[in-house]
Image: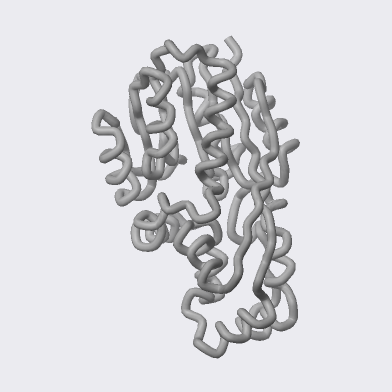
């Protein structure tokens, strides 16, 4: 996905809405990651932590409640980083693409690296070596990422004749818009391939419920989950008539995401 497009999405659309977290999908995923860390890291530990794709700093704020952390963060969006600094005044940050991580925080190794919901934009096999090299021996990687198994009902409905006719499209496929791995097995194989010992790995399938188009846009467009899909078909700009049609034939929807939450250790 183009870097400039992703930056614009977050700076102009998502940043000011991100922490509302409709459906609580982000918060619940972060809590699962915290629970994994709690099982493997003593609460008295002091941690030098790197959060790549730090967003608004929610995870490091949660982490600080139980550990003494020295926080570092990288994000593509200045608006997101600005919010993170309000949460974490001592945050050392950089604004850049995760692909360029090696250009930042020179000479530092980290006890814990976090990448949460980043593999939609940076493929896991591209991201993994950049993370592993920044971990000290025995350091941990907290990984959260969606898979291509997510939102099957939405995808099926988006490919119905009515929707394809309304938006002038042939078909929509997940891989057109995101780099997410296929499933938990693909994540596990990638972590193992890059020299990591997997401590825990699970698939979280949180439900998502939308009574109408407005509720769906709050989650998918402004919340950031499906912004590229929605913008590609101009759904956020749908006419009043199109909204009436969609609310009549498309909604309500009950669906679920598919999110892998993993904790892995760099082999010593």
Q: Quadrant of residue 198?
A: top right
Above-or-below relation of 165 to 128: below
Above-or-below relation of 228 to 44: below
Q: Is residue 62 visible?
A: yes
Q: Quadrant of the C terminus?
A: top right
Q: Is residue 227 visible?
A: no
Q: Residue at x 58, y 85 (%)?
A: 244
Query: Which of 185 and 218 lies nearest the eye of the viewer?
Result: 218
**Residue 79 x, y percent position in the rendering:** 31, 51
Q: Residue at x 60, y 50 (%)?
A: 179
Q: Residue at x 41, y 58 (%)?
A: 14
Q: State the residue lying farthest toward the front.
A: 211
For this view, does 192 lie left or right of residue 17?
right
Q: How many discs appear?
A: 0
For this view, does 259 lie left or right of residue 14?
right
Query: Which of 161 and 220 lies nearest the eye of the viewer?
Result: 220
**Residue 84 x, y percent position in the rendering:** 32, 40
**Residue 43 x, y percent position in the rendering:** 46, 14
Q: State the residue lying farthest toward the bottom.
A: 241
**Residue 240 x, y percent position in the rendering:** 50, 87
For this view, does 83 lie left or right of residue 179?
left
Q: How is the image coloured?
A: one colour
Q: Residue at x 57, y 27 (%)?
A: 35
């Amino acid at each position: 996905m183009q870097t400039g497009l992703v930056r614009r999405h977050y700076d102009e659309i998502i940043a000011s809405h991100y922490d509302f977290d409709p459906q609580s999908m982000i918060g619940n995923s972060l809590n699962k990651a915290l629970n994994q860390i709690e099982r493997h890291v003593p609460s008295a530990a002091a941690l030098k932590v790197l959060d790549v794709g730090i967003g608004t700093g929610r995870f490091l704020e949660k982490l600080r409640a139980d550990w003494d952390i020295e926080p570092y963060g990288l994000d593509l969006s200045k608006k997101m980083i600005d919010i993170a600094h309000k949460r974490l005044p001592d945050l050392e940050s950089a604004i850049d693409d995760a692909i360029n991580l090696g250009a930042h925080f020179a000479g530092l190794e980290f006890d814990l690296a976090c990448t949460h919901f980043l593999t939609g934009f940076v493929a896991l096999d591209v991201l993994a070596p950049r993370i592993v090299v920044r971990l000290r021996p025995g350091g941990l990687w907290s990984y959260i990422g969606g898979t291509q198994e997510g939102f099957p009902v939405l995808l099926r409905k988006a490919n119905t004749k009515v929707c394809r006719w309304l938006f002038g499209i042939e078909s929509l496929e997940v891989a057109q818009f995101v780099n997410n791995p296929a499933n938990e097995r693909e994540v596990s194989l990638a972590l193992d391939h890059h020299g990591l010992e997997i401590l825990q790995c699970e698939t979280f399938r949180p439900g998502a419920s939308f009574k109408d188009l407005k509720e769906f846009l709050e989650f998918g467009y402004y919340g950031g989950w499906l912004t590229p899909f929605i913008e590609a078909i101009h759904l956020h700009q749908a006419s009043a008539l199109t909204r009436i049609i969609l609310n009549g034939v498309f909604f309500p929807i009950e669906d679920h995401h598919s999110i892998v939450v993993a904790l892995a250790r760099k082999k010593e």
